[in-house]
Amino acid sequence: MTSPSASSAPAPLLEVQGVSLAYGPIVAVRDVSIAVPAGSVVAIVGANGAGKTTLLKAICGLLPLSGGSIRLDGADISTLAAHKRVGCGIALSPEGRQVFPDQTVADNLELGAYWRNLSQKDLDAAVEEQFAIFPRLKERRNQPSVTLSGGEQQMLAIGRALMAAPRLLLLDEPSLGLAPLIIKDIFKAIVRLRDSGMTILLVEQMANLALAVADTAYVLENGRVTMTGTGQELLRDPKVRAAYLGAGH
Ligand SMILES: Nc1ncnc2c1ncn2[C@@H]1O[C@H](COP(=O)(O)OP(=O)(O)O)[C@@H](O)[C@H]1O
Ligand SMILES: [Mg+2]
């Protein structure tokens, strides 16, 4: 039977429900709930130490939950091993890039597709897709990654995550430590990914940048969500402006 109102919204691609996380006795994240609808960019902003990286690690399966649940497309993945979550379509570009320094750019990218078991031809095609997004990587394809600038390493970290063909791309502090012009390039690439339909969960200390590209955003303070709204709403909010967008931000 079809209902004329057909108003039931589809489940979000990612649903974090009441999640708490601890390092031994230290509780880093408390009762956090966030939803990431397919095709949207969701930002989590907050100061250093707020729990942003901890939350992303938990979504990837790198930290066990001490409470709550994580669902992908409605299926509970709370206890799924990290490598299986990659197979389910979750890929992380980690804070601090963490590219393999002695490996070339091309090798780092290929490692991102490890689980896909592609033929060499398909692997080459996937690498070329990343070069189309980040042309600077193509010029450096045979250089060891340690020789790249910070901005190029960030592009490589994002490219490596994209090589996993994710349905959900997690970006942890893509602007960290980079010069303003390079940050602009990185965010242009994020906008292009958004426009191509990629679902992105973006963690940033640079709240102005993240909120400007986000459909929805959450403010995380001391491990708790304290505010949520559209990116534009939070950009205009006096409390957010005072705490995260004032002088020095
Ligand atoms: N490996 C760890 N062991 C103990 N405490 C940690 C560890 N990693 C992070 N923390 C603590 O958890 C809290 C949240 O850290 P983190 O998630 O890295 O914050 P953010 O990414 O927002 O800067 C901080 O108080 C931090 O000191
Ligand atoms: Mg962090």
Image (cartoon, grey):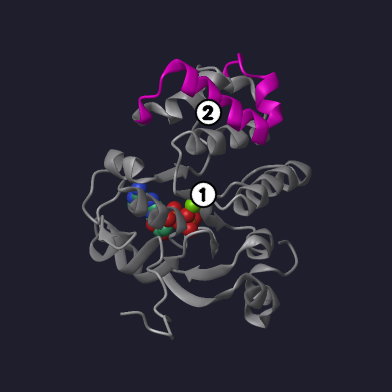
Q: Are marks 2 and 1 in contact (CB under 8 Å)?
A: no
Say left or right for 247 vs 27: right
Q: Earlier in the sequence, mark 2 or mark 1?
A: 2
Disc 1 C-beta below 8 A from ligand 2: yes
Residue drawn 30% across the image and 61% down it: 70
Mark 2–mark 1 distance (CA, rounded to whole Å):
23 Å
Viewer-side residue, 46 vs 91: 91
Location of residue 226 in the rendering, given as x and y in whole percent from the top left corner: 48, 77
Location of residue 45 in the rendering, given as x and y in whole percent from the top left corner: 55, 64
Q: Is residue 137 magenta?
A: yes
Please say if 142 is above or below 185.
above
| Disc number for residue 46 | none
Residue drawn 61% across the image and 48% down it: 193
Q: Nearer the viewer, mark 2 or mark 1?
A: 2
- The kind of residue on which mark 1 rests is Asp
Residue drawn 48% across the image and 50% down it: 170
The picture quadrant where one finds residue 18 is bottom left
Location of residue 17 in the rendering, given as x and y in whole percent from the top left corner: 32, 69
Q: Secondary structure at mark 1?
A: strand
Magenta residues span 116-144
Q: Secondary structure at mark 2?
A: helix
Q: Is residue 113 magenta?
A: no
Q: Which residue is disc 1 drawn over?
A: 172
Outermost bottom residue: 5
Q: Which residue is disc 2 drawn over?
A: 126
Location of residue 55 in the rendering, given as x and y in whole percent from the top left corner: 39, 57
Please say if 120 is above or below 129.
above
Outermost right residue: 181
Residue drawn 51% across the image and 38% down it: 162
